[in-house]
Image (cartoon, grey):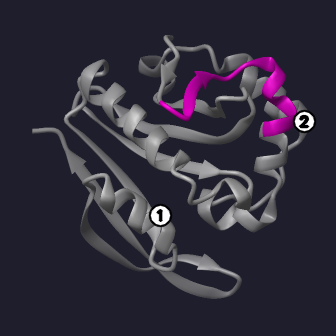
Amino acid sequence: MVTLKGDHIYLRALEPEDLDFIYSIENDETIWEVSNTVTPYSRFLIKQYLEQAHKDIYEIKQLRLVICNNDNLSIGLIDLFDFDAKNKRAGIGILIQANQNRQQGYGKEALKLLTNYCFDHLELHQLYCNISEENKPSIKLFSNQGFEQVGLKNDWNLVNGKYKNEYLFQLINN
């Protein structure tokens, strides 16, 4: 896969050397709500996952890319999931790991790079994302990139004993 490069970040495929980075993200309980995670992941499971990461999106129906800054530091992940070649759509999710790297434009640039890749190279018709009603930064990010709120899923996720609503956003390539 070609590297997707912007002005301040680039997206690259997963590498075996990403084990510690992925491990730290997947086991950070403060972001489990965003990723819908409920249990920790072992290094062994993440190593197995990384060994399969080279497989084609058409085979495994997902693509995870590392967001790197211009100093070659891994700062986040951006994912395509539920890839549906027949209906030409996929879900998209993004995470910037450290608070100091959030709201710096990295997510915006990564989302723009991946959206362009999806429409230009994968020839998708639409992308969608699911965002908690309380996640104002993500709502702003996706809205500013042209995603439209098309639905509200009431009491969708149970978080710490409380049900939370989730928005469905969609971007259609016209």
Residue 67 within the magenta-colored segment of the rendering: no
Q: Nearer the viewer, residue 157 or 79?
A: 79
Give the quarter of the image for residue 91: top left
Q: Is residue 47 left or right of residue 37?
A: right
Nearer the observer, disc 1 or disc 2?
A: 1
Which quadrant: the C terminus? top left
Q: Residue at x 83, y 41 (%)?
A: 23
Do residues under tags 1 and 2 come within 8 Å of each other at their CB atoms?
no
Q: Nearer the viewer, residue 100 or 153?
A: 100
Estimate the x, y position of residue 145 in percent, counting from the top left. Answer: 31, 52
Q: Seen from this angle, which residue lies furthest left?
A: 174
Q: Residue at x 89, y 31 (%)?
A: 44
Mark 2, residues whose alpha carbon is within 10 Å: few (<14), some, or many (≥20)? some
Estimate the x, y position of residue 156 in percent, counting from the top left. Answer: 46, 75
Question: What's the magenta region?
Answer: 7-21
* Res. 138 mark: 1
Q: Secondary structure at mark 1?
A: helix
Residue 20 within the magenta-colored segment of the rendering: yes
Of the residues shown, which amino acid type is indicated by label 2?
A: Arg
Q: Is residue 119 above or below residue 26?
A: above
Of the residues shown, which amino acid type is indicated by label 1?
A: Ser
> Mark 2 — residue?
43
Nearer-N-terminus badge (1/2): 2
Mark 1, residues whose alpha carbon is within 10 Å: few (<14), some, or many (≥20)? many
Q: Is residue 124 left or right of residue 62?
A: left
Q: Nearer the viewer, residue 48 or 150?
A: 150
Q: Secondary structure at mark 2?
A: helix
Q: CA distance from mark 1 to mark 2?
A: 29 Å
